[in-house]
Image (cartoon, rainbow, N blue to C red):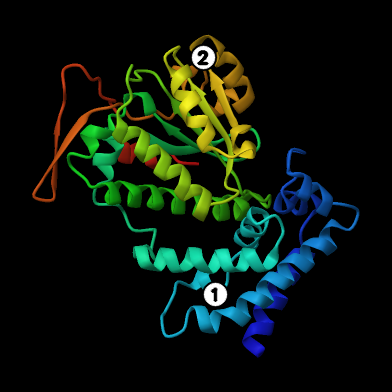
Amino acid sequence: SPKMESFVDGVVDEVDGLEDGNVDMLMGVEDGGGSDEAARHVNNSAKKELKKLVHDFAKLLREKQDTAFAGVSYRSEAYNPSLITIMRFVRGEMFDVEKAVDRFIKYECWLKEKGYCVYNQPDPLEQFYQYMTPHLLCGVDRQGRPLYWERSGAIRVQEVLKQVTEEELQNRHIFHMQRVLSTFEELSKESGRITNKFVVVSDLKGLSFKPSSAALKALKDTLNLDSEYYPETLGTFYLINVPWIFKPIWAMIKPWLDPVTQKKFKLISSSALPEFVAEVGPDNVPAEYGGCASFIIPEKSFYSIEDNNITMEKKDDNNTSNAEPQEQQQQQQ
Protein backbone atom coordinates (compact mmCIF):
# COMPACT_ATOMS: atom_id res chain seq x y z
CA SER A 1 0.00 0.00 0.00
CA PRO A 2 1.12 3.64 -0.42
CA LYS A 3 1.26 4.01 3.39
CA MET A 4 3.58 1.01 3.72
CA GLU A 5 5.80 2.19 0.86
CA SER A 6 6.04 5.64 2.43
CA PHE A 7 7.32 4.26 5.74
CA VAL A 8 9.75 1.83 4.11
CA ASP A 9 11.12 4.45 1.71
CA GLY A 10 11.36 6.97 4.53
CA VAL A 11 13.63 4.91 6.77
CA VAL A 12 15.77 3.85 3.81
CA ASP A 13 16.19 7.49 2.73
CA GLU A 14 17.19 8.31 6.30
CA VAL A 15 20.04 5.79 6.06
CA ASP A 16 21.23 7.48 2.86
CA GLY A 17 21.79 10.69 4.80
CA LEU A 18 23.89 9.11 7.54
CA GLU A 19 27.60 9.71 7.97
CA ASP A 20 29.87 6.67 8.26
CA GLY A 21 30.29 7.11 12.01
CA ASN A 22 26.55 6.93 12.54
CA VAL A 23 26.31 3.85 10.33
CA ASP A 24 28.87 2.13 12.56
CA MET A 25 26.95 3.16 15.69
CA LEU A 26 23.74 1.64 14.35
CA MET A 27 25.53 -1.52 13.29
CA GLY A 28 26.98 -1.91 16.78
CA VAL A 29 30.70 -1.33 16.20
CA GLU A 30 30.97 2.19 17.62
CA ASP A 31 33.83 1.21 19.92
CA GLY A 32 35.30 -1.65 17.93
CA GLY A 33 34.01 -4.07 20.53
CA GLY A 34 30.85 -5.35 18.92
CA SER A 35 29.98 -8.99 18.48
CA ASP A 36 31.60 -11.16 15.81
CA GLU A 37 28.29 -11.13 13.97
CA ALA A 38 28.26 -7.32 14.00
CA ALA A 39 31.84 -7.22 12.72
CA ARG A 40 30.91 -9.56 9.88
CA HIS A 41 28.18 -7.20 8.76
CA VAL A 42 30.37 -4.10 8.79
CA ASN A 43 32.59 -3.86 5.76
CA ASN A 44 33.25 -1.48 2.87
CA SER A 45 29.57 -1.55 1.95
CA ALA A 46 28.28 -1.00 5.50
CA LYS A 47 25.70 1.56 4.48
CA LYS A 48 24.34 -0.74 1.79
CA GLU A 49 24.03 -3.54 4.34
CA LEU A 50 22.34 -1.22 6.83
CA LYS A 51 19.85 -0.09 4.19
CA LYS A 52 18.94 -3.68 3.43
CA LEU A 53 18.44 -4.53 7.11
CA VAL A 54 16.29 -1.45 7.70
CA HIS A 55 14.31 -1.99 4.49
CA ASP A 56 13.59 -5.63 5.29
CA PHE A 57 12.60 -4.81 8.88
CA ALA A 58 10.26 -1.98 7.86
CA LYS A 59 8.65 -4.02 5.09
CA LEU A 60 8.12 -7.09 7.27
CA LEU A 61 6.79 -4.97 10.13
CA ARG A 62 4.18 -3.44 7.85
CA GLU A 63 3.16 -6.87 6.64
CA LYS A 64 2.69 -8.19 10.21
CA GLN A 65 1.13 -5.12 11.80
CA ASP A 66 -2.39 -5.64 10.54
CA THR A 67 -2.56 -8.99 12.29
CA ALA A 68 -0.48 -8.17 15.37
CA PHE A 69 -2.18 -4.84 16.13
CA ALA A 70 -5.63 -5.72 14.79
CA GLY A 71 -8.50 -3.80 16.36
CA VAL A 72 -6.34 -2.01 18.94
CA SER A 73 -4.77 1.43 18.82
CA TYR A 74 -1.08 1.54 19.68
CA ARG A 75 1.30 4.45 20.20
CA SER A 76 2.74 6.02 17.04
CA GLU A 77 6.20 4.52 17.65
CA ALA A 78 4.69 1.05 17.23
CA TYR A 79 3.87 1.84 13.61
CA ASN A 80 6.86 4.04 12.77
CA PRO A 81 9.90 3.03 14.84
CA SER A 82 13.06 5.09 14.51
CA LEU A 83 16.34 3.83 13.05
CA ILE A 84 17.74 3.59 16.57
CA THR A 85 14.83 1.39 17.67
CA ILE A 86 14.89 -0.79 14.55
CA MET A 87 18.59 -1.52 14.86
CA ARG A 88 18.37 -2.08 18.61
CA PHE A 89 16.15 -5.08 17.94
CA VAL A 90 18.07 -6.21 14.85
CA ARG A 91 21.34 -6.28 16.80
CA GLY A 92 19.57 -7.91 19.74
CA GLU A 93 18.56 -10.78 17.45
CA MET A 94 22.01 -11.09 15.87
CA PHE A 95 20.82 -9.54 12.58
CA ASP A 96 17.97 -11.98 12.10
CA VAL A 97 15.37 -9.53 10.77
CA GLU A 98 12.30 -11.73 11.17
CA LYS A 99 13.13 -12.48 14.81
CA ALA A 100 13.81 -8.79 15.35
CA VAL A 101 10.39 -7.79 13.99
CA ASP A 102 8.63 -10.41 16.12
CA ARG A 103 10.51 -9.22 19.19
CA PHE A 104 9.64 -5.58 18.48
CA ILE A 105 5.95 -6.44 18.11
CA LYS A 106 6.09 -8.41 21.39
CA TYR A 107 7.68 -5.36 23.04
CA GLU A 108 4.98 -2.98 21.82
CA CYS A 109 2.20 -5.37 22.87
CA TRP A 110 3.83 -5.67 26.29
CA LEU A 111 4.01 -1.88 26.65
CA LYS A 112 0.35 -1.62 25.67
CA GLU A 113 -0.56 -4.24 28.26
CA LYS A 114 1.43 -2.33 30.88
CA GLY A 115 -0.49 0.82 30.06
CA TYR A 116 2.64 2.86 29.49
CA CYS A 117 1.77 4.59 26.25
CA VAL A 118 2.68 8.12 27.42
CA TYR A 119 6.02 8.64 29.13
CA ASN A 120 6.27 12.41 29.36
CA GLN A 121 3.84 12.53 32.27
CA PRO A 122 5.38 13.11 35.72
CA ASP A 123 5.36 10.18 38.11
CA PRO A 124 3.15 11.10 41.10
CA LEU A 125 5.62 9.22 43.32
CA GLU A 126 8.69 10.93 41.86
CA GLN A 127 9.91 12.32 45.17
CA PHE A 128 9.29 9.03 46.95
CA TYR A 129 11.52 7.18 44.49
CA GLN A 130 14.12 9.96 44.43
CA TYR A 131 14.61 9.78 48.17
CA MET A 132 14.03 6.09 48.87
CA THR A 133 16.01 5.03 45.76
CA PRO A 134 18.18 8.14 45.20
CA HIS A 135 19.07 8.47 41.53
CA LEU A 136 19.49 10.97 38.72
CA LEU A 137 19.59 10.82 34.92
CA CYS A 138 21.99 13.64 34.17
CA GLY A 139 24.96 14.43 31.95
CA VAL A 140 26.83 12.45 29.31
CA ASP A 141 30.20 10.70 29.26
CA ARG A 142 33.10 11.39 26.89
CA GLN A 143 31.32 9.38 24.17
CA GLY A 144 28.12 11.39 24.52
CA ARG A 145 26.20 8.57 26.22
CA PRO A 146 23.66 9.63 28.88
CA LEU A 147 24.63 8.93 32.49
CA TYR A 148 22.32 7.36 35.07
CA TRP A 149 23.52 7.79 38.66
CA GLU A 150 22.22 5.77 41.60
CA ARG A 151 23.15 5.47 45.28
CA SER A 152 22.51 1.74 45.17
CA GLY A 153 24.34 1.02 48.42
CA ALA A 154 21.90 3.24 50.34
CA ILE A 155 18.76 1.61 48.94
CA ARG A 156 16.89 -0.81 51.18
CA VAL A 157 14.46 -2.62 48.90
CA GLN A 158 12.57 -4.17 51.79
CA GLU A 159 11.77 -0.64 53.07
CA VAL A 160 10.56 0.42 49.62
CA LEU A 161 8.33 -2.64 49.29
CA LYS A 162 6.54 -1.75 52.51
CA GLN A 163 4.96 1.16 50.61
CA VAL A 164 4.76 0.01 46.99
CA THR A 165 4.22 -3.40 45.37
CA GLU A 166 6.76 -5.35 43.35
CA GLU A 167 4.75 -4.56 40.23
CA GLU A 168 4.78 -0.83 41.00
CA LEU A 169 8.53 -0.95 41.56
CA GLN A 170 8.96 -2.73 38.22
CA ASN A 171 6.71 -0.18 36.51
CA ARG A 172 8.97 2.56 37.85
CA HIS A 173 11.90 0.87 36.15
CA ILE A 174 9.95 0.68 32.88
CA PHE A 175 9.12 4.39 33.23
CA HIS A 176 12.84 5.09 33.70
CA MET A 177 13.92 2.98 30.72
CA GLN A 178 11.43 4.74 28.45
CA ARG A 179 12.96 8.05 29.55
CA VAL A 180 16.37 6.69 28.60
CA LEU A 181 15.11 5.71 25.13
CA SER A 182 13.62 9.20 24.67
CA THR A 183 16.98 10.67 25.68
CA PHE A 184 18.66 8.63 22.92
CA GLU A 185 16.42 10.25 20.31
CA GLU A 186 16.80 13.76 21.78
CA LEU A 187 20.60 13.64 22.00
CA SER A 188 20.90 12.14 18.51
CA LYS A 189 18.76 14.95 17.07
CA GLU A 190 20.63 17.68 18.95
CA SER A 191 24.16 16.49 18.19
CA GLY A 192 23.71 14.84 14.80
CA ARG A 193 25.56 11.84 16.24
CA ILE A 194 23.69 8.60 16.93
CA THR A 195 23.29 7.91 20.65
CA ASN A 196 21.98 4.42 21.36
CA LYS A 197 23.68 3.34 24.60
CA PHE A 198 23.62 4.68 28.13
CA VAL A 199 25.93 4.39 31.13
CA VAL A 200 24.98 3.34 34.65
CA VAL A 201 27.01 4.53 37.65
CA SER A 202 26.03 2.57 40.75
CA ASP A 203 27.53 3.84 44.01
CA LEU A 204 27.79 0.95 46.47
CA LYS A 205 28.78 3.06 49.47
CA GLY A 206 26.67 1.95 52.44
CA LEU A 207 25.98 -1.49 51.00
CA SER A 208 24.46 -3.87 53.54
CA PHE A 209 26.69 -6.71 54.75
CA LYS A 210 23.82 -9.07 54.01
CA PRO A 211 21.67 -8.12 51.00
CA SER A 212 18.02 -8.98 51.44
CA SER A 213 16.31 -11.67 49.38
CA ALA A 214 13.89 -8.94 48.22
CA ALA A 215 16.78 -6.88 46.83
CA LEU A 216 18.30 -9.84 44.99
CA LYS A 217 14.93 -10.83 43.52
CA ALA A 218 14.25 -7.25 42.39
CA LEU A 219 17.68 -7.09 40.75
CA LYS A 220 17.27 -10.42 38.97
CA ASP A 221 13.78 -9.47 37.75
CA THR A 222 15.12 -6.16 36.43
CA LEU A 223 18.01 -7.82 34.60
CA ASN A 224 15.61 -10.30 32.98
CA LEU A 225 13.21 -7.53 31.97
CA ASP A 226 15.97 -5.44 30.39
CA SER A 227 17.37 -8.45 28.56
CA GLU A 228 13.97 -9.26 27.08
CA TYR A 229 12.58 -5.82 26.24
CA TYR A 230 15.53 -3.41 26.17
CA PRO A 231 18.28 -5.17 24.22
CA GLU A 232 21.38 -3.31 23.12
CA THR A 233 20.87 -0.27 25.36
CA LEU A 234 23.60 -0.66 27.98
CA GLY A 235 27.00 0.78 27.18
CA THR A 236 28.92 0.48 30.45
CA PHE A 237 27.86 -0.33 34.02
CA TYR A 238 30.21 1.19 36.59
CA LEU A 239 30.03 -0.15 40.13
CA ILE A 240 31.94 2.40 42.21
CA ASN A 241 33.04 2.50 45.85
CA VAL A 242 32.96 -1.28 45.73
CA PRO A 243 33.52 -2.70 49.24
CA TRP A 244 35.20 -6.01 49.97
CA ILE A 245 31.86 -7.51 51.00
CA PHE A 246 30.63 -7.19 47.41
CA LYS A 247 32.90 -9.95 46.08
CA PRO A 248 30.62 -12.88 47.07
CA ILE A 249 27.56 -10.90 45.98
CA TRP A 250 29.09 -10.31 42.55
CA ALA A 251 29.88 -14.03 42.29
CA MET A 252 26.16 -14.64 42.77
CA ILE A 253 25.00 -11.97 40.30
CA LYS A 254 27.50 -12.55 37.49
CA PRO A 255 25.95 -15.82 36.23
CA TRP A 256 22.66 -13.97 35.72
CA LEU A 257 24.34 -11.96 32.94
CA ASP A 258 25.21 -13.19 29.48
CA PRO A 259 28.96 -13.12 28.61
CA VAL A 260 28.67 -9.98 26.45
CA THR A 261 26.87 -8.05 29.20
CA GLN A 262 29.36 -9.24 31.84
CA LYS A 263 32.13 -7.45 29.95
CA LYS A 264 30.24 -4.17 30.26
CA PHE A 265 30.49 -4.19 34.06
CA LYS A 266 33.43 -2.43 35.72
CA LEU A 267 34.07 -2.77 39.43
CA ILE A 268 35.89 0.24 40.90
CA SER A 269 37.05 0.61 44.49
CA SER A 270 37.07 3.99 46.26
CA SER A 271 40.84 4.20 45.78
CA ALA A 272 40.42 3.78 42.00
CA LEU A 273 37.87 6.60 41.57
CA PRO A 274 40.43 8.84 39.77
CA GLU A 275 40.55 6.25 36.97
CA PHE A 276 36.76 6.32 36.74
CA VAL A 277 36.75 10.13 36.58
CA ALA A 278 39.38 10.13 33.84
CA GLU A 279 37.41 7.61 31.79
CA VAL A 280 34.04 9.36 32.07
CA GLY A 281 35.48 12.88 32.03
CA PRO A 282 35.83 15.23 35.04
CA ASP A 283 33.30 17.68 33.58
CA ASN A 284 30.72 14.90 33.67
CA VAL A 285 31.31 13.67 37.24
CA PRO A 286 30.00 15.32 40.46
CA ALA A 287 32.53 16.81 42.87
CA GLU A 288 31.88 14.15 45.52
CA TYR A 289 33.49 11.58 43.22
CA GLY A 290 36.40 13.79 42.20
CA GLY A 291 34.93 15.54 39.18
CA CYS A 292 33.88 19.14 38.65
CA ALA A 293 30.27 18.83 37.40
CA SER A 294 27.81 21.08 39.24
CA PHE A 295 24.88 18.68 39.62
CA ILE A 296 24.24 16.83 42.88
CA ILE A 297 22.79 13.34 43.27
CA PRO A 298 19.98 13.26 45.86
CA GLU A 299 20.80 11.75 49.24
CA LYS A 300 18.85 8.96 50.89
CA SER A 301 15.94 10.09 53.06
CA PHE A 302 12.75 8.42 54.23
CA TYR A 303 9.38 9.16 52.67
CA SER A 304 6.05 7.76 53.79
CA ILE A 305 3.01 7.60 51.54
CA GLU A 306 -0.32 8.28 53.22
CA ASP A 307 -3.61 8.65 51.37
CA ASN A 308 -1.75 9.27 48.11
CA ASN A 309 0.11 12.16 49.73
CA ILE A 310 3.82 12.18 50.39
CA THR A 311 5.33 13.37 53.64
CA MET A 312 9.04 13.35 54.39
CA GLU A 313 10.41 12.04 57.63
CA LYS A 314 14.13 12.68 57.90
CA LYS A 315 15.92 9.99 59.83
CA ASP A 316 18.73 11.05 62.16
CA ASP A 317 21.13 8.56 60.59
CA ASN A 318 20.59 9.76 57.04
CA ASN A 319 21.85 12.96 55.50
CA THR A 320 19.69 14.81 53.02
CA SER A 321 20.73 16.89 50.06
CA ASN A 322 20.15 20.63 50.20
CA ALA A 323 18.88 20.49 46.65
CA GLU A 324 15.43 19.13 45.87
CA PRO A 325 15.29 16.26 43.33
CA GLN A 326 13.03 18.24 41.00
CA GLU A 327 15.61 21.04 40.89
CA GLN A 328 18.27 18.51 40.03
CA GLN A 329 16.20 17.15 37.15
CA GLN A 330 16.12 20.57 35.56
CA GLN A 331 19.90 20.35 35.23
CA GLN A 332 19.70 17.27 33.02
CA GLN A 333 21.78 17.60 29.92
Q: Position of residue 121 (x, y in %)?
A: 33, 58
Residue under the image location 45 percent in, 50 percent down: 225
Label 2 and label 1: CA atoms lie apart by: 45 Å
Considering depth in this image, is 318 or 256 the residue closer to the camera? Answer: 256
Q: For the residue labelled by badge 2, is the local secondary structure a helix, a strand or a loop?
A: loop
Image quadrant of residue 85?
A: bottom right
Mark closest to the chain's N terminus, 2 or 1:
1
Q: Position of residue 185 (x, y in %)?
A: 57, 55
Identify the residue position indicated by label 1 in the image.
Answer: 79
Considering depth in this image, is 124 or 27 the residue closer to the camera? Answer: 27
Residue under the image location 67 percent in, 54 percent down: 91
From this viewpoint, is residue 133 visible? no
**Residue 269 numbered tag:** 2
The amino acid sitting under disc 2 is Ser
Image quadrant of residue 100?
A: bottom right
Above/below status of 279 relative to 311: above
Looking at the image, the residue that sits furthest to the left is 307
Relative to residue 299, is residue 43 drawn left or right? right
